[in-house]
Image (cartoon, rainbow, N blue to C red):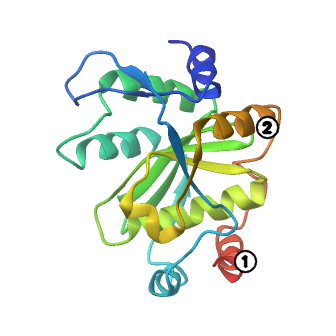
């Protein structure tokens, strides 16, 4: 698929998934209810808030997108990310629509996440951790960036008990699509000039729940 074709599917509330890591091709899916995470009102547990403010990782953005998506595909036995999906998202990344937030420690990639930016919506796709709390801290940095950049919703597709602690909520699929399409012409900034990662996260955590 071309980038435009894939983004058009996202705009209709659909997203690609393969059944198995070894599959060829993929299908498109849409849940009856859409799971989202609050951006500015993200709930950050007290212990995790303290750890995030200790800055245990070097946070980078879009420096290792391919490594992040490969790690997401390989970190668990059952995955919907196959080689065709990896190729599609690498192309989305090269075209400026897919981004990664990465946690580095002693020069090694130890956690992170990736997703798709479409208008005012950021569609979170997958995350991974090789060390404790790395993906969670990547999520905090993602939300700080989205909040400062002007995004209006953070899609997490299906309900995931791992994300419940952050205030995950659900809305009808039709409501999600309507909000996404109403904000397709928005131009929030994922990559922001002179963005100060630490100051942004500290300010974000002061206002997070």
Percent position (x, y) of residue 126?
41, 46
In the picture, the disc for residue 203 is 1
Give neighbour class at mark 1: few <14, some 14-19, many 20+ (Cα, 10 Å): few
Query: Which residue is at a point 24% across and 43% down the rendered structure image?
Result: 74
In the picture, the disc for residue 40 is none
Label 1 close to label 2 by CB (< 8 Å): no
In the picture, the disc for residue 183 is 2
Between 61 and 7, the one nearer to me in the picture: 7
Disc 2 secondary structure class: loop
Q: Is residue 124 left or right of residue 40?
A: left
Question: What is the quadrant of the C terminus in the image?
Answer: bottom right
Mark 1 or mark 2: whose residue is earlier in sequence: 2
Query: Which residue is at a point 22% across and 48% down the rendered structure image?
Result: 76
Between 132 and 47, the one nearer to me in the picture: 47
Q: Which of marks 1 and 2 is in front?
A: 2
For the question of whether residue 104 can be seen, the reply is no
Give neighbour class at mark 2: few <14, some 14-19, many 20+ (Cα, 10 Å): some
Percent position (x, y) of residue 101?
52, 54
Percent position (x, y) of residue 172?
59, 42
Q: Is residue 142 left or right of residue 26?
A: right
């Amino acid at each position: 698929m071309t980038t435009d074709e894939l983004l058009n599917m996202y705009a209709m509330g659909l997203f690609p998934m393969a059944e198995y890591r070894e599959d060829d091709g993929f299908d498109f899916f849409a849940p009856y209810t859409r799971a989202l995470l609050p951006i500015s009102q993200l709930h950050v547990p007290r212990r995790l808030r303290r750890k995030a403010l200790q800055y245990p990782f070097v946070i980078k953005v879009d420096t290792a997108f391919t490594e992040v998506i490969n790690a997401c595909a390989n970190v668990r036995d059952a995955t919907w990310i196959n080689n065709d999906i990896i190729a599609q998202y690498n192309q989305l990344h090269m075209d400026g629509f897919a981004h990664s937030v990465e946690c580095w420690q002693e020069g090694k990639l130890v956690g992170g996440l990736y997703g798709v930016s479409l208008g005012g919506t950021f569609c979170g796709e997958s995350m991974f951790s090789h060390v404790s709390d790395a993906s969670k801290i990547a999520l905090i940095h993602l939300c700080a960036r989205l909040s400062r950049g002007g995004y209006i919703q953070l899609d997490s597709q299906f309900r995931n008990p791992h994300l419940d602690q952050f205030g995950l909520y659900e809305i009808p699929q039709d409501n999600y699509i309507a909000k996404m399409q109403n904000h397709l012409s928005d131009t929030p900034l994922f990559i922001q000039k002179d963005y100060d990662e630490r100051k942004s996260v500290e300010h974000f955590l002061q206002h997070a729940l």
